[in-house]
Image (cartoon, rainbow, N blue to C red):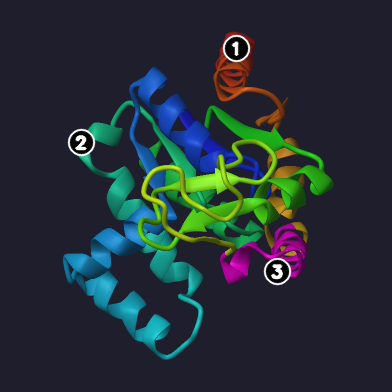
């Protein structure tokens, strides 16, 4: 299957992308991973992207699209892929359509992870990270440490990242609504959108997504 995964920050896209890609035996193609890989390998696209980033500018769509195109042409993506973080806006979605048409392939589904805005704020603003090891992550509501402000694993101080503050989360949601959410209507016009709730245990959400994708594929 060829899938685009969309949803607001805090919807659990990263977690579900990894799980779904594994279950469907297709590569998970994340824009963040693409940028890191191209920059660390010092590819021409990576050098170009880094030049924009070092100057404090956004990387142009055409560079992101070129990276995605290169990744989708790798042998492991021959039978499908799951795109996470791309396309990020309608112009990127149009470019992706054009690219796929050139290759003679089409998307099978656009999976929209739906979550109420206040839940997003609660999920992200409640995160606490260990200063000693950023892989030690807690949540004031969902996975609170035994002692407030102290990491259960190593005893390090827990803190809230600046970009996890409620104010910043609401700004990120504004950007999502303005720039990314319009691609849902764009793909709805093509009959590709499958919307599922991103509330509940992780395993349940994964199963919900797999069943919805299966129904979508069977209906074509």
Quarter of the image for residue 7 reads: top right
* Label 3 to label 2: alpha-carbon separation: 39 Å
Choose the circle earlier in sequence order: 1 or 2: 2
User: Is residue 11 found left or right of 20 in the rendered image?
Assistant: right
Q: Residue at x 72, y 29 (%)?
A: 199
**Label 2 crowd bin: few (<14), some (14–19), many (20+), radius 10 Å:** few
Q: Which residue is mark 3?
A: 168
Percent coordinates x, y for residue 34 in the rendering: 33, 57
Q: Quadrant of the C terminus?
A: top right
Spatial separation of the CA atoms under disc 3 and disc 1 = 34 Å
Q: Which residues are magenta?
A: 161-176
Q: Which residue is mark 1?
A: 211
Determine the residue positioned at 36% across, 49% down: 154
The residue where tag 2 is placed is 75
Q: Which image quadrant: the N terminus?
A: top left
Q: Secondary structure at mark 1?
A: helix
């Amino acid at each position: 299957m060829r899938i685009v995964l969309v949803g607001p920050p805090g919807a659990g896209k990263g977690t579900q992308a990894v799980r779904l890609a594994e279950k469907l035996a297709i590569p998970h193609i994340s824009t963040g991973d693409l940028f890191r890989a191209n920059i660390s390998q010092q590819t021409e696209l990576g050098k170009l992207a880094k030049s924009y980033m070092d100057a404090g500018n956004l990387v142009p769509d055409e560079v992101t699209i070129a990276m995605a195109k290169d990744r989708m042409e790798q042998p492991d993506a021959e039978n499908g892929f799951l795109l996470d973080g791309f396309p990020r806006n309608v112009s990127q979605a149009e470019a992706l359509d054009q690219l796929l048409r050139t290759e003679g392939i089409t998307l099978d589904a656009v999976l929209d992870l739906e979550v109420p805005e206040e839940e997003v704020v609660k999920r992200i603003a409640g995160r606490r990270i260990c200063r000693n090891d950023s892989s030690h992550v807690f949540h004031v509501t969902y996975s609170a440490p035994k002692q407030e402000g102290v990491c259960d694993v190593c005893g390090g101080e827990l803190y809230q990242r600046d970009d996890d503050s409620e104010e910043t989360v609401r700004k990120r949601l504004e950007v999502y609504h303005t720039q990314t959410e319009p691609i849902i209507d764009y793909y709805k016009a093509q009959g590709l959108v499958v919307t599922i709730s991103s509330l509940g245990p992780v395993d349940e959400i994964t199963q919900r997504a797999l069943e919805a994708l299966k129904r979508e594929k069977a209906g074509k």
